[in-house]
Image: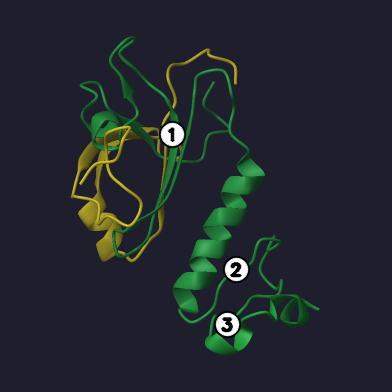
Amino acid sequence: MLEKVKYTMGSDPTGKLSRMFGVYDDATGLALRGTFIISPEGKLLNHEVNYYNLGRNIEELLRKVEANIYLGEHGDEACPVSWKQKGDKTLKPSAELVGKVHQAME
Amino acid sequence: MSNACGGLSVGDIVPDFRLETFEPEKGDFGEVSLRRITEEKKWLVLFFYPADFTFV
């Protein structure tokens, strides 16, 4: 049954980790559908929590992981609203950019 | 630090934690810690789900 699973599966039987990340549901004893992205420096960069019956969008998760990796390597840049994948235009936040984001994105 | 829902806030440094694991590619149990992952300079995605057979 696990033959296609390639990632590490963690075990949190006491709910300690779920509580640390704020996804433990006291009413059911289950974890909500939470996704957390942590940088190599140990910083929590993203948090998404869905109630039980809403599945998560994996394309969006991969987009955010790629974006965070890129931003980790380019500390002076920002991924704008429309950023989808590596290679898409980014912005360099500065006073000069005020009122000119549209132009910068053309 | 906590937010309105309890738990860590985005921007926090995550405290070290350890988890017992199962590695399907090795077919064996193991253990992972956040400290070891950051020592290896890796990114980590934690993906919580409520239970098996919840279909989403």
Left of A36 or right of it: where is A58?
right
**B15, B17: nearer the viewer:** B15
Front tag of 1 and 2 = 2
Vertically, is A6 above or below B5? below
Residue at image mark 1: A34
Q: Disc 3 and disc 1: Cα gap in Å?
A: 31 Å
The numbered dot on residue A79 is 2
**Chain letter for the residue marked with disc 1 in the picture:** A
Apparent colour of chain A: green
Residues tagged 1 and 2 counted as in contact (Cβ below 8 A): no
Q: In the image as oriented, which residue stretches furthest toward the bottom?
A: A96
Looking at the rendered structure, the kind of residue marked 2 is: Cys
- Please identify the quarter of the rendering in which residue A77 is found: bottom right
Looking at the rendered structure, the kind of residue marked 3 is: Lys
Residues marked 3 and 1, same chain: yes
Q: Disc 2 and disc 3: Cα gap in Å?
A: 9 Å
Percent from the top left, x then y, of residue A93? 54, 80
Residue appearing at x 69%, y 77% in the figure: A101
**Chain letter for the residue marked with disc 2 in the picture:** A
Percent from the top left, x then y, of residue B3? 29, 40
Residue at image mark 3: A92
**Label located before the other in sequence (3 or 1):** 1
Q: In the image as oriented, which residue stretches furthest toward the right?
A: A106
Left of A2 or right of it: where is B8?
left
**Chain letter for the residue marked with disc 3 in the picture:** A
Sort mark 2 into few (<14), some (14-19) or many (20+) by Cα contacts within 10 Å: some
- Please identify the quarter of the rendering in which residue A57 is found: top right
